[in-house]
Amino acid sequence: MATTTMSKTEIAKTEMTNAQIFALAWGIFFISVTLLLLAATILLTVYGIGFGFALNSLFLLLLIPVIAGVTIAVVKKVTPPMYEDLYEWNGRVMEPFEPGPHYPFPWFGFLKPKGRMPMNMQFVHVLSGDRTGLPPKTVAKYQFGGQTNVEIGRGVKTGGFVRLYYSIGLKIVDSIKAAYVQKDLYKYIAGIIEERVNTHALSESPEEFSSTFYDAAWSEKIINNAKGDILKNLGVELSVLIPGDIINTPEVEKARQDVEVERRRKGTLDEKLINMKVEKDIAHEQHLIAVDFIKKVKETSGASGDTLVSLLARQMTLDAVIEATKNGHLAYMDGSEGKGLMNSIAIGVGIQSGLGGSKSDSKKDDSDKDESKKDDGSKNKNKKR
């Protein structure tokens, strides 16, 4: 893509002010008129026409104000508000004529009108892309911009093109530069902005650019990057870029749909992976809680690890421990619910003592059982006798 460069044309300006030029032009004109009237007076007197030299001279001299008034009325020009008129004097540019009445000298080619420049806010409407099939009003409005559809960059293989509509707000602050540096000012500025917009489009995918195109910060950045050079060289101040619309070609639309399908598929897969990881983390956490619970029961009951695990396996599965954990029974291991649960498990597996029991109590129970067996044995002997 070619880079647009600013023109540095030197503008030849007059060294005199407009008032000096008008005084000179109109002075020459009225001096010429006076001399012509004087010559006419002499000829009339010589040929005996009129009332003599004195009266003829007086009569013709009275015509000078009349001629001046008619001339001024004929040449009067009015510059409307928010405009400036430009004239050249002897091939050099005069100061711009600001709003109000002016009396430029129209004869002998001294002053040449060069145009009227609007000084209010203007909008340049740009359409980058093919105009085929568009309504005539749209084509008439969006008269600037390339005829080729804009190529879109990453994410699209071939045929990735769009048509772009947007408007550029600008204001002329130096009418002389605006009129003389570039022959077609608005077309030139539209080309500079269009090049920047299209270059940016080429660096993004359709999804990215469709979001960027309507971003106020991006539009401001495009304007700010170009406004300095345009103001300096063209005398035009850029103010805003207003996005209009993006029209996708069928190829881009299909590519966008493919990307959207892939994005949704990937999103579903990522969601499944996340859910699996969460479930795995929960199961691991519950396993650690269950192991900690068994450890606390063992410490409380005094049973050996192997015996406790074996007994617990018969009376309470690991899933039951996990379920108890989910239901909040193990939330407070030092609370009544926790003690009650551990006590129930301890009783269920045949451990006689509760949370307050000790190893000595267990031994005492065992000795009582032995004594009971001895008594039963002695009774049997007596029966035999």
Image (spheres, grey):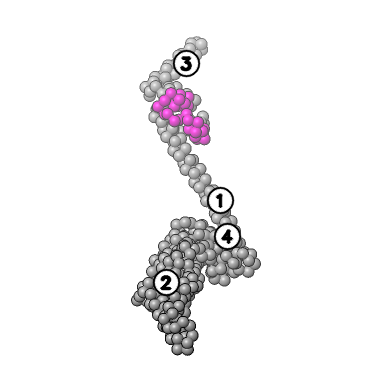
The label nearer to you, 1 versus 2, is 2
Q: Secondary structure at mark 4?
A: helix
- For disc 1, the marked residue is 268
Judge by depth and name the residue closer to the eye, 102 or 3. 102
Q: Secondary structure at mark 2?
A: helix
Q: CA distance from mark 3 to mark 4?
A: 94 Å
- For disc 4, the marked residue is 256
Mark 1 nearby-residue class (10 Å; few <14, some 14–19, many ≥20): few
Q: Amino acid at mark 1?
A: Thr
Judge by depth and name the residue closer to the eye, 18 or 305. 18
- Main SS of the magenta part reads helix
- For disc 2, the marked residue is 176
* Residue 279 falls left or right of residue 303: right
Residue 323, position as x, y percentages in the image: 51, 33
- For disc 3, the marked residue is 377
Q: Amino acid at mark 3?
A: Gly
The label nearer to you, 2 versus 3, is 2
Q: Residue at x 51, y 57 (%)?
A: 214
Looking at the rendering, which quadrant does residue 305 occupy?
Answer: top left
Sequence-wise first label, 1 or 2 = 2
Q: Secondary structure at mark 3?
A: helix
Q: Amino acid at mark 2?
A: Ile
